[in-house]
Image (cartoon, rainbow, N blue to C red):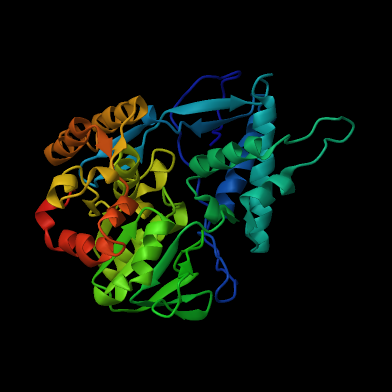
Amino acid sequence: MAKRTTSKGTSGAKKSTGAKKAPAAKSSAPRGKRRERPDTAGKIVTLAQDIVSLAHEETDPFVDIPIRALSNVDFNPKTRYIEMGDKTQRRNFFNFGQAKRFMQTMLVASKCKENVEAQKTTSIRGMYYLSKHTIKGTKEKTFDAQEECDPILEDLEVSLSALREELHVYASSRGAMIGELTFVDSGDTIDATKLGSGGYAIPSIVEPDVIQFKKCNAKFILHVEKDTVWRRFVEDRFWEKHKCILTHGNGQPPRGVRRLLHRMHKELKLPVLVLMDNDPWGYYIYSVIKQGSINLAFESSRMAVPDAKYIGVSSFDYDRFGLSDDVKIELDANDMRRAKQILNYPWFAGKKPWEKEIRKMAKNGFKMEVEALSVKRLTFVTDEYAPAKLKDKKAWLD
């Protein structure tokens, strides 16, 4: 966020001071339509006003972008989630190497403000096309590819402390839910026990003004890594037998899935149990659900579930469940490097059970996928494995 200053030609990294809050205004959006936080548009206006003020003072206009990297996040042991630090990268207008990105930042901010004021949303791809044009009198385009636009949108998120959904930009749905829950989505009542084999496609925007929970008979949430595993649980009606809600994020869960898990955990008081592949990537996905991600550290308090528990697949399950060699996938050098990185994360460091788990995987020399459990029997994972895991709480990892 740009800040007015009396010194000219200022450059380099400095602490962000945060956005000024605009007066809250009553929303006239009809029921079921997206409403931003009261100050989202105000934050964009403040950003623009600060830039204009710098120009009037004959000071090189700039915007400070919080750095999205491991070097700028801290693990708060009290809240048990990742928090963003105060390191920033300054983007100046009168800098030949930064001028284009500076103007791209202003352009995308302007388009987001238009969406907010019109109470309309667009996709990430749509934002690229909304912002793309040839600058008058030149052959220069504002954006040559979407890969240029996406990072600018992320820069705005962290600079304004607002998720892209609050800037009225959404991503494609990449996750699903089914189970013992009735809720309202944009005014439509949905019974999640009656959604066939496909379930409910979790949208990017899942805020309380869009989704309201009504009736919940679930005892817990079981989040699985992939769609293929989720479908096994759905076909075997695991959610019905065990009175739960089943979700997946098709790999690392997108924001909408993580935000919904957070809301169901907080508002419905449901435990979140995570079933991932037995590999460094599965461990990392669990940590993103539990502690938050580095890129979105500024919003961990609204997305992370610090009480989430990892119930498998564990490196010890090969012996516990008498699995055969057919489940083994040999670890490679990248797996081992990733495992060591994870152990060094502050939110894993010092946790003896996790150290034991990862060292066991390294000693085994192999990793395992949830789907591999089907070598025992097609429904082994739902009939025996998962129920056994639910009972054996001592084997859960925190």
Q: Residue at x 53, y 55 (%)?
A: 166
Q: Is residue 75 left or right of residue 201?
A: left
Residue 355 vertical placement versus 203 (above, below): above
Closer-to-camera residue (326/134): 326
User: Where residue 22 sits: x, y (%)?
Assistant: 54, 53
Q: Is residue 4 left or right of residue 337?
A: right
Count the marks: how many? 0
User: Where residue 294 sits: x, y (%)?
Assistant: 39, 38
Q: Residue at x 58, y 70 (%)?
A: 33
User: Where residue 103 sits: x, y (%)?
Assistant: 69, 33
User: Where residue 226 sits: x, y (%)?
Assistant: 40, 54
Does the rendering let one see residue 190?
yes
Residue reaching furthest right? 137
Closer-to-camera residue (262/278): 278
Q: Residue at x 33, y 41 (%)?
A: 284
Closer-to-camera residue (393/88): 393
Q: Residue at x 43, y 58 (%)?
A: 227
Does the rendering let one see residue 105?
no
Residue 251 vertical placement versus 179 (above, below): above
